[in-house]
Image: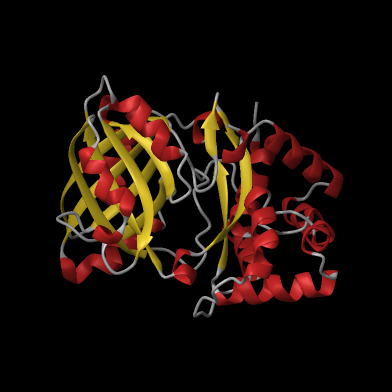
């Protein structure tokens, strides 16, 4: 069972994914050994994975949110196949198992250039499909991610850690062939040590540090902290597809991103101009969110809800038997 200290550690990692155990221990007020032991237990248990990701923009790609309405009796194989594809992230089943929601990385110019997006409508289980461009993710650069608010760090503690994180200034640097061993190691473990990165690249530790800093500050290398909210007591996850007044698009997106319940909010193309992922404890908690916090956001004209029934993939982790694992292990 997780407790408040585990939640504080997870929140701290969202704020600064590569923060040292020593620094994190100073912020949460326990020993460095305790923080290291708790983190390693969370990672071994498949509850948390910190991963380093190459930014799609560095490869001339954009991210598209796809909604596939499928035959419930035939959706499983397609959903599992999509989750295993490297260009697919955040895949899940929703709406009673009749809808697949996923993010697909594809050429920035047009979705029609992508082979996967051309093939999907011809899949036997697909009844209908919509694909919209993710134009802007709301929140501060390098969002701190969802932590549920309960048992988390204080605002001052979170600001301390966020202030120590590299701030991307762009434009993204395209990774080189020499960077591949570095990026592969970070995709497996975003907190891997400089010593280990020096071993896999054949570089010196100072060179590793310089290259990490260059990739991070250009925005080419980002980090994601994959978690399983269900194992933290948050059972109800849903995607909200919102129609908002265009003049208030940015203000509403930023307001949503500050809600404890909101894990992700972005401006999208299509009839719904904001998509948000909301994570709540149960149905009553979700209704409270809809009828209070969301209801008080001015400018929301309407919304649809897709309740998630099975999570398939996070940013770079498959969910296998209730654990986050590296895709290569399945």
> Left or right: 293 with respect to 244?
right
Q: Quadrant of the C terminus?
A: top right
Q: Is 213 placed above or below 316 here?
A: below
Quadrant in the rendering for residue 114: bottom left
Q: Which of 205 and 273 is in front in this view?
A: 205
Q: Is 113 placed above or below 153 here?
A: below
Residue 326 in view, yes or no: no
Kindly identify the residue that appears in the image at 79 percent across and 74 percent down: 207
> Left or right: 46 with respect to 303?
right
Kindly identify the residue that appears in the image at 68 percent across and 46 percent down: 9
Quadrant in the rendering for residue 52: bottom right
Percent of width and height locating residue 13: 64, 52
> Left or right: 125 with respect to 182?
left
Labels in figure, total? 0
Q: Is 106 placed above or below 293 here?
A: below
Percent of width and height locating residue 305: 24, 39
Kindly identify the residue that appears in the image at 49 percent across and 71 percent down: 58
Percent of width and height locating residue 278: 37, 43
Which scheme is used to colour this image of the protein? secondary structure
Quadrant in the rendering for residue 111: bottom left
Q: In which quarter of the image is the N terminus?
A: top right
> Left or right: 15 with respect to 43?
left
Percent of width and height locating residue 164: 67, 69
Kindly identify the residue that appears in the image at 42 percent across and 70 percent down: 60
Q: Nearer the viewer, residue 207 or 309?
A: 207
């Amino acid at each position: 069972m997780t407790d408040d200290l585990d939640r504080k550690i997870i929140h701290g990692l969202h704020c600064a994914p590569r923060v040292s155990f020593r620094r994190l221990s100073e912020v949460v007020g326990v020993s460095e050994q305790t923080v290291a032991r708790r983190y390693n237990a969370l990672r071994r248990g498949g509850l948390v994975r910190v991963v380093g990701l190459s930014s799609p923009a560095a490869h001339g790609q954009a991210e598209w949110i796809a909604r596939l309405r499928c035959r419930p009796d035939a959706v499983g194989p397609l959903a599992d196949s999509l989750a295993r594809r490297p260009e697919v992230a955040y895949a899940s089943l929703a709406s009673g198992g009749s809808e697949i929601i996923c993010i697909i990385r594809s050429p920035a110019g047009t979705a029609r250039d992508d082979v996967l997006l051309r093939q999907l409508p011809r899949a036997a289980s697909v009844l209908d499909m919509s694909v919209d461009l993710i134009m802007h993710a709301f929140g501060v650069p390098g969002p701190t991610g969802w932590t549920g608010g309960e048992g988390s760090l204080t605002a001052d503690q979170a600001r301390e850690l966020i202030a120590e994180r590299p701030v991307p200034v762009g434009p993204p640097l395209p990774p080189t062939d020499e960077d591949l061993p570095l990026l592969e190691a970070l995709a497996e473990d975003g907190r891997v040590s400089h010593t280990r990165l020096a071993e896999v690249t054949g570089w010196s530790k100072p060179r590793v540090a310089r290259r990490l800093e260059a990739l991070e500050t250009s925005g080419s290398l980002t980090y994601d902290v994959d978690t399983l909210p269900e194992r933290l007591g948050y059972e109800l996850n849903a995607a909200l597809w919102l129609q908002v007044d265009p003049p208030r698009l940015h203000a509403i997106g930023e307001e949503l991103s500050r809600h404890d319940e909101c894990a992700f909010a972005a401006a999208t193309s299509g009839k719904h101009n904001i998509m948000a992922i909301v994570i709540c404890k149960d149905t009553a908690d979700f209704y409270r969110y809809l009828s209070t916090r969301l209801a008080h956001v001015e400018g929301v004209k309407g919304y649809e809800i897709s309740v998630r029934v099975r999570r398939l993939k996070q940013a770079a982790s498959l969910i296998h038997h209730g654990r986050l694992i590296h895709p290569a292990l399945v």
